[in-house]
Amino acid sequence: MTTTATSRKTPVKAAAASFMGSAVEYYDFFLFGSAAALIFPTVFFPSGDDAALVMSFATFGFAYIARPVGAVILGHFGDRIGRQKVLMFTLLLMGISTFIIGCLPGFAQIGWFAPALLVVCRLLQGLSAAGEQAGASSLTLEHAPENRRSFFTSWTLTGTQGGQILAALIFIPVVALPDDIKFSWGWRVPFWLSAVVVVVAFFIRRSLHETPEFETAKATGQIARMPLVPLLRDHWRDVLRVICCAFIAAVSTVFGNLALAYGTEQGLAQSMTLWLVVVANIVALGTQPLFGVLADRIGRKPVFIYGALSSAAFMPFYMLSMGAGNAFVTFALAILTFSCGYAAANAVWPSFYGEMFSTRVRFSGMAIGTQLGFLMAGFAPSIVAALGGVEEGGWVVISLFTAVIAVIASVSALTARETKDVPTARLGVAAEERVPVTA
């Protein structure tokens, strides 16, 4: 096989490895979110009332506390020793912590130690997730052709949707079980199954070599000893910009987690609320790569801003439809809100954020910026639930919350440079040289 042929196949292989790794990571991550809405209030807390639901959603949010810490640690090593090695570690850490969750005793057995152990496992999940998307996006971006970076990096987040689909599909038969089975051992099975999918992804990901950009930086002595120093010195504006843009991820947790509880409160069957997530994510598997192609043609900023503002515009209609009794309309609005709205921002952010930074600090910049911004996403369900978002009329709270974060993300995106025509080797160099980047 010629060198040209090999290089031509590398972007596809990198995108496939990122897709599979993200699918496994976020199968585990979203599995916890579904269980936090439907299972954990009964199993890990003393009562199944609204207070237990708020506490359960809080355990979901604890992962987002660990994620900034993990971002600093994993970002450092990702920029020092390489993207691929760190991604192998994050995959194993997520799989082990998820499997252990399936083995934990409940509140009836060990009292408050049960939610405490659940939080510990959730923190380990957060440490793992802190490096996954930033590492996979950096790796795919640096393997991709310069005129198709947004398309190839979109597969990292498309893998995230695949993981959410798998988690929801496996959880649908669980919620249909009789309560005595569901709340005893039935809910544990999906967590145990994570061991299987981790093994599959491990063998796929380990065959992918390090990126040419990183190898070049390493060979020419451009690897920073402490990547955090040049990151905060030269790219602090971009880090702040990514933090604010990353608020838009709260749309995903509101849609995929909080809406499960709100829909149930409105009289929808638990299985139907899960099917809403499944169908919307299945459609997003097709729309996200298309949004990636569009961003390669017209730019990252307009596609990202459209995704942020449209998801906020559609959200109140989706929430209202849950109590209207028309399943077709609810499914259509779920697709419109998530697959045709939020999916645009979700598909584009790996290239949009990653292209703000140079190779020597890209992993750290993306990891730290996104994980600080994702704190909003992590605690969105518990914040909105505490404000009455799962009660009668809660659609107003949910809609206003979504609108506020969408505006913040859009205004932040407007301040960014457009990078679709900047060569990969020149990405982020302007901030370090203090001169304008030219194509």
Image: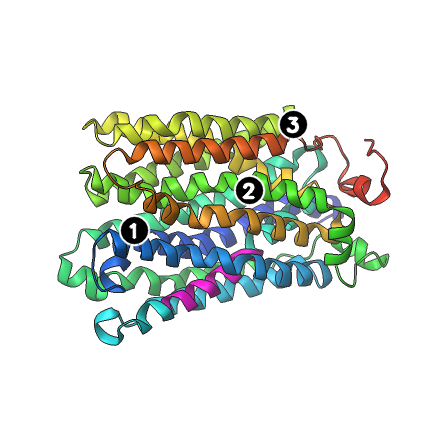
Q: Which residue is drawn at 51% across and 56% down?
A: 129
In front of the other: label 2 or label 3?
2
Q: Identify the mark at residue 299; answer none if there is no mark.
A: 3
| Dominant secondary structure, magenta | helix
Q: x, y percentage for residue 215? A: 77, 56
Q: Earlier in the sequence, mark 3 or mark 1?
A: 1
State if disc 1 and disc 3 touch (CB < 8 Å): no
Label 2: element kind: helix
Identify whether 254 is placed above or below 171: above
Tell me the element at label 1: helix
Mark closest to the chain's N terminus, 2 or 1: 1
The mark total stands at 3
Name the residue type under label 1: Ala
Q: In this view, does 300 lie above or below 230?
A: above
- Gap between marks 2 and 1, in whole Å? 23 Å
Q: Mark 2 points at which residue?
A: 246
Q: Which amino acid does label 3 sit on?
A: Gly
Q: Residue furthest bottom?
A: 110
Res. 332 in view = yes
Vertical order, 160 against 423 (above or below) = below
Extent of the magenta region: 117-131
Q: Where is residue 55 in the image (x, y as percent from the top left)?
A: 32, 57
The disc labelled 2 sits on which kind of residue? Ala
Q: Position of residue 220 (x, y in %)?
A: 86, 56
Check the image and report above or below for 132 versus 318: below
For mark 1, does the 10 Å Cα neighbourhood hold few (<14), some (14 to 19), or many (20 or more) residues? many
Q: Left or right: where does residue 275 sit relative to residue 403?
A: left
Q: Tell me the SS state at disc 3.
A: loop
Q: Is residue 9 visible?
A: no
